């Protein structure tokens, strides 16, 4: 049974690898994160550290369209980095700031199940990359209501004993939508609050938000609707890794997340608001 949450908002912040891999940027983000009021969740990446360790171990890192191909050896590396080094470093730093954090992956508590991504029509085999099937928002709520702050690494499982490497933006969107569903009583358990808390999702990375010109912060797009997003993709203004990030953002809005923001560590309440 899910008990009342006394705050009107649950906040999920996804932080990119470029932030967590720079000590000064990470400290700035965590200083801001601990002052976010109410229950909160942190989802993190760490791809550059994984690439560096793989290189040191003599394992070639292969990327297709900006996405990592995860063979068996690479899966070992990302498990060590995401679920171990990066995750526990964040947990330790949050504990030092008085935030009772718990490091998790999607495999822990059966939080997120996924399936291995099939080979693409072009013949690309991404290996042990996981596409999400389901998430247990009720379990996350139970953790939040005990005063625990989950810190989630982007690893999932297939319920057949295999870990899978899942995109961190997708993990954040999955956690947010699962919590939103659970608060509406759509997941296991029932939300008892007369006015259930809303769920907000923030994608936090090194840029100030969605930019018309990636090299010019003054071109920030303050508000972005899905039709405008489609138009900006069509004309080439929005491209590359920003496209899947925004796809996840709009998917979260459609699934009942109250607000989604894309911003930098310098302004968690600024950046681009997704509408």
Image (cartoon, rainbow, N blue to C red):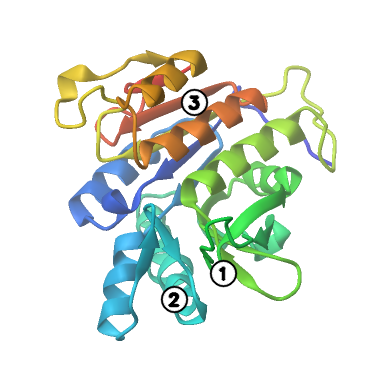
Where residue 117 appears, as percent x and y from the top left, is 62, 60
| Circle 1 Cα neighbour tier, 10 Å, few/some/many (<14 / 14–19 / ≥20) | many
Where residue 209 appears, as percent x and y from the top left, is 30, 28
Q: Is residue 258 visible?
A: yes
Is 116 situated above or below 11? Answer: below
Residue that numbered label 3 is attached to:
260
Residue at the location (52% across, 80% down)?
A: 72
* Secondary structure type for disc 1: loop
Asked which quadrant contains residue 265, the reply is: top left
Residue at the location (26% across, 82% down)?
A: 56
Between the residue at mark 3 and the residue at mark 2, the CA separation in whole angstroms equals 32 Å
Q: Looking at this view, is 124 or 32 the one in front?
A: 124
* Mark with earlier residue (3, 2): 2
* Mark with earlier residue (1, 2): 2
Q: Is residue 9 visible?
A: no
* Secondary structure type for disc 2: helix
* Mark with earlier residue (3, 1): 1
Between the residue at mark 1 and the residue at mark 2, the CA separation in whole angstroms equals 9 Å
Choose mark 3 or mark 2, whichever is in front.
Answer: 2
Q: Are marks 1 and 2 in contact (CB under 8 Å)?
A: yes
Residue that numbered label 1 is attached to:
128
């Amino acid at each position: 049974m899910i008990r009342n949450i006394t705050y009107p908002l649950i906040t999920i912040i996804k932080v990119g690898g470029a932030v967590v891999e720079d000590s000064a940027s990470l400290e700035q983000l965590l200083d801001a994160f601990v002052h976010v009021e109410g229950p909160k969740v942190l989802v993190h990446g760490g791809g550059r550290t994984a690439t560096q360790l793989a290189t040191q171990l003599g394992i070639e890192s292969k990327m297709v369209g900006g996405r990592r191909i995860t063979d068996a050896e690479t899966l070992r590396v990302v498990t060590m980095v995401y679920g171990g080094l990066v995750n526990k470093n964040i947990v330790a730093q949050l504990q030092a700031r008085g935030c009772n954090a718990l490091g998790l992956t999607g495999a822990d508590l059966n939080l997120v199940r996924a399936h291995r991504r099939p080979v693409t029509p072009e013949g690309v085999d991404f290996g042990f990359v996981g596409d999400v099937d389901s998430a247990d928002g009720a379990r996350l709520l139970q953790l939040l209501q005990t005063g625990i702050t989950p810190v989630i690494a982007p690893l999932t499982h297939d319920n057949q004993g295999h870990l899978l490497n899942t995109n961190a933006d997708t993990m954040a969107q999955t956690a947010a939508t699962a919590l939103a569903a659970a608060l509406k009583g759509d997941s296991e358990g029932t939300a008892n609050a007369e006015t259930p808390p809303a769920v907000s999702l923030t994608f936090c990375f090194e840029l100030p938000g969605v930019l018309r010109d990636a090299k010019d912060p003054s071109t920030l797009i303050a508000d972005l609707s899905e039709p405008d997003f489609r138009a900006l993709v069509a004309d080439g203004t929005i491209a590359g890794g920003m496209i899947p990030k925004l796809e996840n953002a709009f998917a979260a809005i459609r699934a009942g997340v109250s607000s989604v923001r894309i911003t930098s560590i310098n302004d968690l309440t600024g950046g681009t608001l997704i509408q």
